[in-house]
Amino acid sequence: MKLNAFTWIIITLAVTAWVFILPVKTVACLLVLQLILLLYIKRSKTMLAAIGGLGVFTGMMIALQLLFGSPLDVALFGGLRMLVMTLAFLCMLATTKIQSIAKALVERFHMPVEYAFMLTTALRFVPNFLEDSTVTLDAQSCRGYSNRGNALKRLWSYLIVIRPLVMRAVAKSETLALSMELRGFGANTYGNMPKDPFTAADLVALAIVLFLSAYPLWSRHVPALAGFF
């Protein structure tokens, strides 16, 4: 099901609000739907690694909350909220082109071109940065790099990897800035892109977003629906 970039942005923003107003079992259902969608769209090692990394980070957050005295249910619900919000952005990036997101931000949300480009470029550079870190780590390992020892020794030895990684990122940013200047980056950057029309699927998705966003209102007047959700 192909959705408009504007629709995906609305869904992503709505999910970040739903996790604070919907009951825990509904938020858990959202998590299951997100995982099914991500695995259906792109079942690759990178996607599985990203989901696994988010799961580990969520577990660390829950452990920290428990360590500082939070009740178990509060810690679990807090971790669930964070995971659902993060996976919402991951779903948007997996289903929508970065250029389409930037175009929607500029045309639909009237965001300045510079800020839209900066935001979408940061999102695009995250996977590239992860790939560069893997390449740099392999290159340094071939030169005799070793991360054995205690935690402090590993952290100190990892500085050997960080320096070329940062230099590589700076070189890429300078190349990108030069390319933008040569191509005349400005207000009309996204004006020549093909339009992303609305379809029936977009209308259905937006209707569902509106329905769930009104949960505090209809949950008081429709007890049957409130019990279901």
Image (cartoon, rainbow, N blue to C red):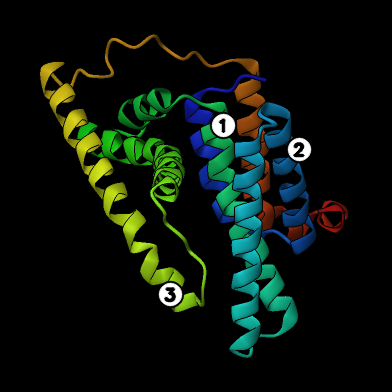
Separation (CA) of disc 3 from disc 2: 40 Å
Residue visible at 76% across and 37% down? 36
Asked whether 88 or 44 is in front, the reply is: 44
Give the residue pinned by disc 3. 153
**Quick check: 201 left or right of 160?**
right
Q: Secondary structure at mark 3?
A: helix
Q: Secondary structure at mark 1?
A: helix
x and y percent of residue 158 in the render?
A: 39, 62
Q: Earlier in the sequence, mark 2 or mark 1?
A: 2
Q: Crowdedness of circle 2 by 10 Å Cα count: few (<14), some, many (20+)?
A: few
Separation (CA) of disc 1 from disc 3: 37 Å
Q: Is residue 52 visible?
A: yes
Above or below 6: residue 132: below
Contact between marks 1 and 3 (CB within 8 A): the answer is no
Q: Crowdedness of circle 1 by 10 Å Cα count: few (<14), some, many (20+)?
A: some
**Quick check: 14 left or right of 181?**
right
Name which quarter of the figure residue 168 lies in. Answer: top left
Q: Crowdedness of circle 3 by 10 Å Cα count: few (<14), some, many (20+)?
A: few
**Quick check: 106 left or right of 95?**
left
Contact between marks 3 and 2 (CB within 8 A): the answer is no
Q: Earlier in the sequence, mark 3 or mark 2?
A: 2
| Nearer to us: label 1 or label 3 | 3
What amino acid is found at the position of numbered circle 1 in the picture?
Ala
What amino acid is found at the position of numbered circle 3 in the picture?
Lys
Q: Which mark is residue 94?
A: 1
What amino acid is found at the position of numbered circle 2 in the picture?
Ile
Residue visible at 67% across and 76% down? 75
| Nearer to us: label 3 or label 2 | 3
Give the residue pinned by disc 2. 36
Residue visible at 63% across and 90% down? 69
x and y percent of residue 225 in the render?
A: 83, 51
